[in-house]
Amino acid sequence: MSGTGEQAAPVLRIEAARLEGFVHAVLTAIGCDRATADAATRAMMHASRHGVDSHGVRLLPHYVSVFNGGRVNKRPDLRVVAEMGAVATLDADHAHGALAAYTGMDKAVELADRAGIGAVAIRNSSHFGPAGAFAMAAAERGFIGFATCNSDSFVRLHEGAERFHGTNPLSLAVPVEGQRPWLLDMATSAIPYNRVQLYKSLGRALPEGTASDIDGVDTTDARRVEMLAPLGGEFGFKGAGLAGVAEILSAVLTGMKLSFDILPMGGPDLSTPRGMGAFVLAIKPSAFLPVEVFQQGMERYRDTLRASRTTEGGVVMAPGDREWAEAERRAVDGIPVDPTSAEAFAGFAAAHGVEWP
Amino acid sequence: MSGTGEQAAPVLRIEAARLEGFVHAVLTAIGCDRATADAATRAMMHASRHGVDSHGVRLLPHYVSVFNGGRVNKRPDLRVVAEMGAVATLDADHAHGALAAYTGMDKAVELADRAGIGAVAIRNSSHFGPAGAFAMAAAERGFIGFATCNSDSFVRLHEGAERFHGTNPLSLAVPVEGQRPWLLDMATSAIPYNRVQLYKSLGRALPEGTASDIDGVDTTDARRVEMLAPLGGEFGFKGAGLAGVAEILSAVLTGMKLSFDILPMGGPDLSTPRGMGAFVLAIKPSAFLPVEVFQQGMERYRDTLRASRTTEGGVVMAPGDREWAEAERRAVDGIPVDPTSAEAFAGFAAAHGVEWP
């Protein structure tokens, strides 16, 4: 995910713990069970703490709509419906995608703990937010975590002229002893859609080859963007192929909907479950080599990377470094809440008797 | 891998079966055991048949040098040195990388057949050639296959100004009933180095942001290229992160050398084993859902992809489609052998009493 350094100045900054308490209280007030409120709050706060605002607390009004509309189940009964050796299939009963993905990763870690690797295909899930949150849940316990999900079509194919894949994120988190993990969390599109929205509001030209107009023709005019390009520019078949990895693991291997069959996230239908899949995997390093050797390797890799020579004015960072730096800033300054979200939050506070910080 | 449509016209075209027999005979004549000659030939011919000439039979002279130099073991004793549940570690005894990777994938498929998923970390391997060949070995048996390897440094970091990662390929192959698999086989660099070499010979400008000069400054002049850029252009942190996935799985998780510690492929030292790792993984679709449902999903996904609307003059292809088309052409026209390789092959024929077709 790209950083938020270019975001427009926020009106409000709220201390993380208070914001977290508010989000949880709203979800509880609308009738979500404890596990659902915990997981949805945890995923949104992961994103809001680390500067990935597109998947942060600004999603709360959307989630409230789909819980109340019936698309997402407030009190789901998640069940492992198939299990064999080191793999399982989890039916999430149309749970919030974050509850489905955290539950799936818990199971993958349990499988990997005894088999060295574990994978869980998740059925009947919903929008899960930041893929990195679930990969990181494995890394926090000393496992390599991988998480992916497809989503409704918004990205064209290489040389394509219509929406085909979703932004289909891939995330890998790798534990580093006593430090923050190595954390890759990337959309397989050339550019995140929130960057397009930002450039539209700034009247700034997009980078070449990152987005297309309604005819699939590349445009740098953010106002004309109807679809994103796959990662890779002239070699966009690579980005489209990576989107396919997400598609195959999270939709084909789960028997769930392909991106072009998923109902749009924003409605108008907020009552029909979207039939989304997801896929999570955990690897236990100590099943392959002494964990000290693994940790020494990770430290040497990351330290050498951070010290690599840069272009003039350039900065090299390991995956995740931008997020950890932003998390430190936000731990001090609070989490920015945009005016639209702040207004919605005040409405929730009034409607449900929850105190708005 | 990019196609070879732009390659300079070859002098010779040799029928695939005859070329395969020649390569195998040369490897046998220099003292390689049967398994080594089989695996190295199979991997080179996979690449040569599918148009990935950079990893095809043009590597034979290099492989002969490193076998004779002692870097690569002509008669290795490959052993599974650790196994737990669904994972194993294979010590390849400095085998040819193709033998190591095919052997590792055989083991991963065996593990996945009983546990739903299987992963093998490979130690003491060497240059393995086309990653797709090993992923495809799983798909040919009905499993999803994944293969990756790091390699000596040639790609800068995002905003970096020195070689850091190798071209670190990632490959995923997915079976499609009764058809060729879905096959993604991509370097994590922005451009393949053979494209740079081709553009140099043609005097043609490289695409923007794909390669840098000795100071790490982007250049479109192929003659000044000292390092490649990571995939993604302005979002090159994604390509660098993907290179990191290859690095962590194939070097850190195996305890083998990081890219910047690997001896150069081309020498001068051709006797010291390079201490390279690799990582392969197999997934059994029927462990997750009925295999017919999986196959219907793959067919619908690939058929819809191939029919997706294109830009004017554009062509959309599923990963692998370019390679299957090239394989059909080459099955008729023969496999191109460039003049430098042809001269080396004639020399091997004379030295070892092997008939050169």
Image: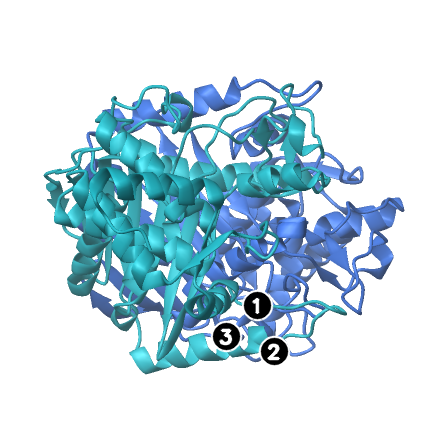
Chain colours: A cyan, B blue
Ranked by sequence position, the earlier of labels 1 and 2 is 2
Q: Relative to B150, does residue A54 appear above or below in the rendering?
A: above
**Could you say whether the residue bearing mark 2 is in a helix, strand or loop?**
loop
Q: Is residue A342 left or right of residue A232?
A: left
Q: Mark 1 and mark 3: span between their CA atoms? A: 12 Å
Residue, far right: B203
Q: Amino acid at mark 3?
A: Tyr
The answer to which quarter of the image holds residue B324 is top right
Residue at horizontal 62 percent and vertical 43 percent from the top: A232
Q: Secondary structure at mark 3?
A: helix
Q: Give the label on residue A301, or none.
A: 3
- Which is nearer the eye, B142 or A49? A49
The amino acid beneath tag 2 is Ala
Q: Position of residue A90 (x, y in %)?
A: 17, 41
Q: Give, as a three-letter code, the residue at label 1.
A: Met
Q: Earlier in the sequence, mark 2 or mark 3?
A: 3
Residue holding disc 1? A317
Task: Say which of A302 and A192 sits in front.
Answer: A192
Q: Disc 2 designates what residue?
A: A307
